[in-house]
Image: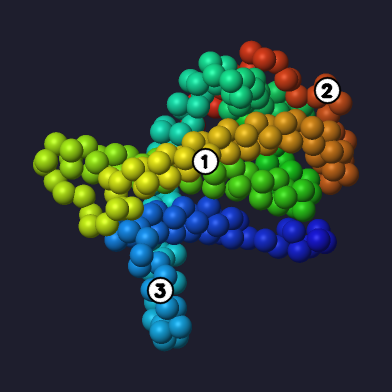
């Protein structure tokens, strides 16, 4: 793919992917939870008229941006922070790179005017990449979009799992009756499926976050070289610190 095509991809495209996908998953999960899986085979999209299809797509996109913003904000609390706490405590989750800040980014790229009370983080690298080489910046942003999608999906599956467990407990207590059917909210099949998808999505977010930290660290010299060509001059300091004691991203406004 050429640099012009890569740099032409609008940021809204990534937002659309990150917001619409978990919203569709949430909608499908709620529909199956309430009605079971039997209705899925009865869907006939061919019956939709053009105006109805356009209206449906508009509503889906609108709701996606509403739910997507909520998922993005609260997944930092309900997905990211539990994983930070679990990191290093259980097998397969012992990476020192999870949610680590790129604290030396300002000095590495020779940027002046850095705030005294803020460490560098991944966004310094992303924005530098866009200024130095839009093609590289767009590719890095695409990989970050996949990471954010994984976090939003984990949040969505956790909501569906929680809903199913709540319905099951209310049903056992005789306070409410679960949906009709054996595979909806409250059923063992639905709860187990939601639990499995939640674990997989949490694990995917963990892995993608670690991969992206490693990717930004390894490609920083490439970005620095591109910056020298774009801006002239450049910094010659050592590569960004990879200290195991580097601070963690606990879910700041630039998460």
CB-based contact (under 8 Å), mark 1 and mark 2: no
Report, in whole angstroms, how far the alpha carbon at label 2 lies from the one at label 3.
60 Å
Which residue extends farthest front?
Answer: 182
| Side of 129 relative to 175 (left or right) | right
Q: Position of residue 118 (x, y in %)?
A: 57, 24
Q: How is the image coloured?
A: rainbow
Q: Is residue 36 above or below residue 55?
A: above
Mark yes or no: residue 36 visible: yes
As helix, strand or loop, the secondary structure at mark 3 comes to loop
Marks 1 and 2, the one that precedes in the sequence: 1
Q: Position of residue 10 (x, y in %)?
A: 63, 60
* Closer-to-camera residue (37/248): 37
Marks 3 and 1, the one that precedes in the sequence: 3
Residue at the spot of label 1: 201
Could you tell me which residue is drawn at 44 percent across and 59 percent down? 24
Circle nearer the viewer, 3 or 1: 3
Query: In the rendering, which numbered label is found on residue 43?
Result: 3
Could you tell me which residue is drawn at 54 percent across and 19 percent down? 90
Residue at the spot of label 2: 237
Circle nearer the viewer, 1 or 2: 1
Marks 2 and 3, the one that precedes in the sequence: 3
As helix, strand or loop, the secondary structure at mark 2 comes to loop
């Amino acid at each position: 793919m050429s640099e012009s095509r890569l740099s032409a991809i609008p940021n809204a495209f990534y937002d659309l992917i990150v917001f619409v996908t978990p919203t569709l998953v949430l909608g499908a999960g709620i529909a199956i939870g309430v009605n079971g899986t039997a209705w899925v085979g009865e869907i006939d999209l061919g019956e939709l008229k053009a105006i109805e299809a356009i209206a449906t797509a508009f509503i889906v996109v609108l709701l996606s941006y509403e739910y997507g913003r909520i998922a993005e904000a609260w997944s930092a609390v309900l997905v990211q922070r539990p994983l930070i706490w679990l990191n290093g405590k259980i097998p397969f989750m012992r990476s020192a790179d999870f949610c680590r800040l790129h604290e030396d980014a300002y000095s590495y790229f020779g940027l002046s005017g850095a705030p005294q009370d803020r460490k560098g983080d991944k966004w310094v690298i992303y924005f530098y990449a866009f200024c130095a080489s839009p093609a590289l910046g767009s590719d890095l942003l695409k990989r970050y979009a996949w990471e954010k999608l994984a976090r939003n999906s984990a949040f969505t599956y956790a909501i569906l799992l929680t809903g199913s467990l709540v319905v099951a407990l209310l049903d056992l207590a005789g306070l409410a009756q679960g949906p009709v059917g054996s595979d909806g909210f409250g059923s063992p099949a639905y709860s187990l499926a939601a639990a499995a998808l939640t674990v997989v999505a949490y694990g995917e977010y963990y892995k993608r976050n670690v991969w992206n930290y490693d990717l930004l660290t390894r490609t920083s010299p490439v970005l620095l070289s591109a910056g020298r060509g774009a801006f002239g001059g450049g910094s010659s300091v050592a590569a960004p610190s990879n200290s195991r004691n580097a601070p963690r991203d606990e879910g700041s406004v630039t998460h």
